[in-house]
Image (cartoon, helix red, strand yellow):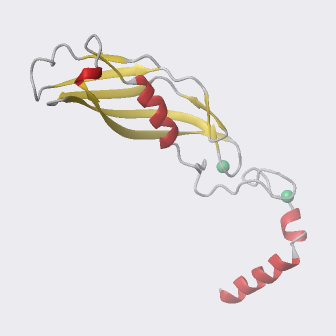
Amino acid sequence: MNIKVNVESIKENLGTNLKQEFDVFLEDMLIQGREISFENPAKFDVTIINSSEEYIVMAHVKLRAILPCSRCLEEFSMTLEFDFNFELSKDEVVDDEISVGEGLLKELRLAFPMQAVCDEQCKGLCPSCGKNLNQEDCDCFMHKVDPRLAKLQKLLKEDE
Ligand SMILES: [Zn+2]
Ligand SMILES: [Zn+2]
């Protein structure tokens, strides 16, 4: 992703910083095997500080993602917000431009939770018939209980 910040305005003054905000359009992507899409644009704020030997880049990202629930597989949307920082040696800066887009994409992948549910109360899919238990009940779970599970359920009941 080609997003660059021009640091010409701060390069002569140590300790000064520069802030820039971007509206970023993210394309659908596959993260941890899940198809993810986005409610664009994402908000991308970048602050760059002119430090002694390097530039310090501090970025903040806020976006809304649309992804399948880990339990029921229905799509839902969630807000994801994260920060990332890096330093770049001044020797590596070409034409006063610092590229920040690759970092955004890399960190975005890391920032996604392994498990994301549409609702804490989501009942998920029936492991036997595959019905979405948020939408309808099925009989199979209670009627075809594994004998080991039945024993466990009995124990849990006695515990109550
Ligand atoms: Zn769900
Ligand atoms: Zn079922």
Image point (16%, 31%), residue name: 51
Q: Is residue 103 above or below residue 70?
A: above
Q: Quadrant of the C terminus?
A: bottom right
**Residue 138, image x and y in percent?**
85, 59
- Name the quadrant containing residue 76: top right
Image point (46%, 40%), residue name: 80
Q: Return the residue found at the far bottom.
A: 158
**Residue 94, image x and y in percent?**
30, 14
**Residue 71, image x and y in percent?**
68, 52
- Name the quadrant containing residue 83: top left
Q: Is residue 35 above or below residue 114?
A: above
Image point (60%, 50%), residue name: 117
Q: Is residue 160 above or below residue 81?
A: below
Image point (9%, 21%), residue name: 13
In the image, taking residue 156 as reference, residue 138 lies left or right, namely right
Q: Return the residue found at the far front.
A: 91
In the image, taking residue 79 as reference, residue 131 lies left or right, namely right
In the image, taking residue 75 as reference, residue 135 lies left or right, namely right
**Residue 67, image x and y in percent?**
62, 38
